[in-house]
Structure formats: C-alpha cells, structure tokens
Amino acid sequence: MRDFSTDHRWLSINTATVRRQRGLDWGLLDILDACAARGIRAVAPWRDQVAAAGLQNVAQRLLAHGIELSGYCRGGMFTYTDAAGLQAVRDDNRRALDEACTLGAPCLVLVVGGLPGALAGKPAHKDIAGAREQVTEGIGALLQDARERGMPLAIEPLHPMYAADRACINTLSQALDVCDALDPTRSGALGVAVDAYHVWWDPQLQAQIERAGRERLLALHVCDWLTPTTDLLEDRGMMGDGVIDLPQLRGWVEDAGFAGYSEVEIFSRANWWQREGGEVLDTCIERHRRCV
Amino acid sequence: MRDFSTDHRWLSINTATVRRQRGLDWGLLDILDACAARGIRAVAPWRDQVAAAGLQNVAQRLLAHGIELSGYCRGGMFTYTDAAGLQAVRDDNRRALDEACTLGAPCLVLVVGGLPGALAGKPAHKDIAGAREQVTEGIGALLQDARERGMPLAIEPLHPMYAADRACINTLSQALDVCDALDPTRSGALGVAVDAYHVWWDPQLQAQIERAGRERLLALHVCDWLTPTTDLLEDRGMMGDGVIDLPQLRGWVEDAGFAGYSEVEIFSRANWWQREGGEVLDTCIERHRRCV
C-alpha cells in the first residue's frame, strides 16, 4: 500500500467539496487556482461547474496548472418514460463524453438514475427491476460511443438510500454484473468508481473489490460516514471524522491493482460548506495524509 | 396470494406506528383498545411500551380482546466493548425472551446493533467485521435460551443507512448466512423478519426470499419509502404513498410459504405521528386492503 503520510501527490479534489462555501458558489477556475497553490495535482469537476466556467477556459486552466482529472462528474441518469426522454438521455451523455475527452479525464463517472421522475418527487412507477434494465441498456448504448472516443465509463454504485431517486445500482456486485454482461473481455472500457461512502457497509465489499480487479477499478472516492448522519445527501464527513476504515478500504483496492488518485468528495451543507474554501482544502490535505 | 381487499384479518399494527400522536405518548393499553374496536387482530408491541403499561396488564388486555402478536419488538443490540457490556446484553435479551413468552409472541425480532457506542454518537471503533462477529456469537448464545423456551428468533436486516449505529446485518442474504451457520437444519428456531423499508432496494431480494423459505420467514413488515425522504429514521411512508411495490413483495414471501400477518410499522415524526391515533389506524386498514 502506498505511503500517503508525507505528501499528497495522490490526492484529488472532487470540486463539489468546495463549491458552495458560505452560501456562495466558488467558481471552478478559482478552485483550480486554489488547488494549484497547494500542490494538489488532480480534481474531479462537475459538469455544471465546467459549464459555468466555460469548457475551454477550464481545459486551458488545467493545462496551465498541470492539474489532471481523476474522473469527470458525471454522466448517467439513464431511466426514462418515453422516446423523447430516451433521446435526451443519449444526447446528454454523448455531450458528457465529449467534455470528458476535452478535459482529458481518465473516465466518465456514471450515476445511473433511479425511478424516472423520483428525483423531482414524482416517480412515474415502482418498477425498480425495469429501471435497472433501462440502465443496463443505456450503459450498453453509451459504451459504443465511449469506445470510439477511448473514454472509459465508471459505474458508481450509490448507497441503497438513493435507490429510488438517484441510482438503482446500489452495490459493487450489481455494478460488476453489469460490467461483466456488457464488457466480458474486461477491455478497460467499462469499470466502477468505488466511493467509500456508498459501499463501506457492504459485507461483500472486500470480495467484490477483488473481483473487480485492476481493469475494473477506475476511481476511488473518499469521505466519511458520520454518526449521527443528519441528512441523506448533504451530511458527509471529512475523512477521519466518521466510522469508515479508509486505510483498510484503500488497502483492498490497491491490493487489487488500483494505483490512482484518492478523490475527496464531501457534500456538507452544515459544516464544510460553511467554511472558507482554502481551509477545507488544507484540511483535505492533512486528512489525506493521516486518515486515508 | 391471499386476497386482502375485503377484510383486514391479516393486518397487524406495530405499536410504534401510533405511539407518539401529536407529541403525546399514546399508552399501549389504549392502543390495544383502539385496535380491538376496529377488529384488528394482531399487534407488535415495543418493550418500552409494554414496560410502561405493565407486562401482566398487557398480557391480560391482549387476552381480553383476543388480540395476538405478530412479533415482539425487540431484542438484539449484541455488540459490546467489555465483559460487563456482554453480560448486560445477554441478561437483557433473556428478559426480552421471557416477555415474548408471557405475551405469546410468535417470534422475538432482533435488531442486532451496529458499532458499539455509535448510536450514542461515540463509536468505540470502526471494525464493522468485528461487530458482525459479535452479532453472530450473540445470536448463537441467545438461540440456546430461545430453543429452551420455544421462542423463535427473527433477525431483521436493517437498511444499510443504519449499518453504523443500529444494525450491521444489512441484507437478507447476510441474515440468512447467519441463520444457516447457527441453525443448519432449518429447525424453525431461527429466521428473518422481512421489512419492506429495509430490503426493497436489494437486487437479490426475490432470490433471497426464495432461499429463506417457509422455515425462515417469520415476519413481514410493511410501510413505504417516500421520495424525497427527509429523515433517516422518522420519515417512513404509509403504504401506497411511496415507491415500494408491496403487492410484489408480499407475493414473493407468500410464494415462499409465508402465511402470517402483514405488520405495519411507520415512524413518521412530521406526518402520521401528528395525527389522531384512530385516524392513523383507520388509514392503515384502508391501505392494507388497497395497497398491500
């Protein structure tokens, strides 16, 4: 297992971690500058942040700072109720692929979607098995475009508490079943993003990480699970403040062959988003060295 | 599959559903009277409610009304940090068994506990695998007492969002692995409580219900998963108000041989606990007929 204690060369910042500081949006270009000033070598930006800053502006700033991506956040949301919805999903995911290519991302992360309409509070139906079929079909279709562009797709299983409205792929086992069905040769074009927050509870976690192996392990996301957790979405903890044994998890993914960035992704309305962005980044660096 | 549409003979009320009406505790004896007045034939009371009303008083009132139990809620919380903690767990679970016998329960439901101390916000460690070992050992020890008393134990897998602080058994598969390890002959002394809220998201659900079979399926709990869900613990929905396909789930457990009560268990601080208890019971009856 790599030694993280003396530097932060394998730290990446998911830019949602510092996007809403003290109630104000912190622009992506400013975030990149703040990361560069601290020797942070990688980020994972969100599409809306990129759009707000301008795709080419972001690409140029990344180049100027020598910052690379640990992933592009995000494609997916594959479920739909009609032909127009399906077409919109496909078009949007192709645009996400193109953006990922422009930014030189190592993978496009996929949050696959839940029951159509559920995120807006109006689920169109209760057929989660059907939603899962749509997701597999959607990833299969996108995979052809992704192969053409040489952009790997990373399925991110989300915690089961998001099964209804954000992602109906909820375990690493389930994500790997989809990978095996669509990419049986383990070509490197399709894999998973392992986010500690979503999978830490899974009794099969170690076995499924081994099953994934080097070809399928495309990203590692870290934060922590707080006790108590006061919000389903925006109460993630800084590494070390919760109950996840992050060194154990990192050991498992590295034993399986992963050698990439440890990407910090923290949504924290009441705590970290209330602090000055530089303080949050400094804390990420310190915790990355000590707790991951 | 049984027809529930014309009566509610297979409806049971978990008494937490009507325990905190409009900010006031509704006493268990009054709840029993209100159930009897509506022809509700079964309840699942909580231990603290029984203690407050008096064990013998509750037993007599149940007898007077001809109300039976669908389960006794609850034993478990097996994890500990020292010998005194272990002894306290054992003593408390034996008392729970004795109470379940006095009340004529068909099973003692087990919520197995998470990381010791986590429920109080102070987890003693991050070793969830170790906690799971303590749980298996604890159930194994209690199973001897349970067999002597002829009281089946029903392991209730809790939703993964409770893995840290309430129960580190989080899938039906995992619960059944424990059952198979401790009761390989499928004697009927050890099984599972299937709660729709905790397991609805699981891609393996149908297969694991089939695996459980008649001998292991000791209880069925129903409510609904709301979109959005605003609280991790106390925002459960009334059947029909959320995204769970309850008739499908009931079909699966009945196909596997379950023929017992459908037990309504709703924790709802902002909605159902704010209403008059009789209205909640009437709604449970109506939804039981129409949505379960």
Image (spheres, coloured by chain):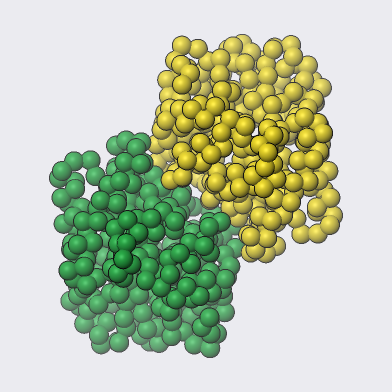
Chain colours: A green, B yellow
Residue at point 51% right, 78% down? A288
> Is residue B49 left or right of B148 when viewed as pictured?
left
> Is residue A50 left or right of B37 when viewed as pictured?
left
Residue A46 visible in rendering: no
Q: Is residue A93 above or below residue A12?
A: above
Coordinates of residue A217 in the picture (x, y in percent)? 40, 69
Coordinates of residue A169 in the picture (x, y in percent)? 39, 52
> Is residue A250 left or right of B169 when viewed as pictured?
left
Q: Is residue B160 above or below residue B212?
A: below
Quarter where residue A211 is shown:
bottom left
Q: Nearer the viewer, residue A151 or B240?
A: A151
Residue at point 49% right, 59% down? A199
Q: Most extreme residue toward the front, as rendered?
A: B185
- Tally of numbered discs: 0
Residue A102 visible in rendering: yes
Coordinates of residue A1 in the picture (x, y in percent)? 53, 81
Q: Nearer the viewer, residue B71 or A116?
A: B71
Coordinates of residue B184 in the picture (x, y in percent)? 67, 42
Q: Is residue A178 above or below residue B202?
A: below
Quarter where residue A28 is shown:
bottom left
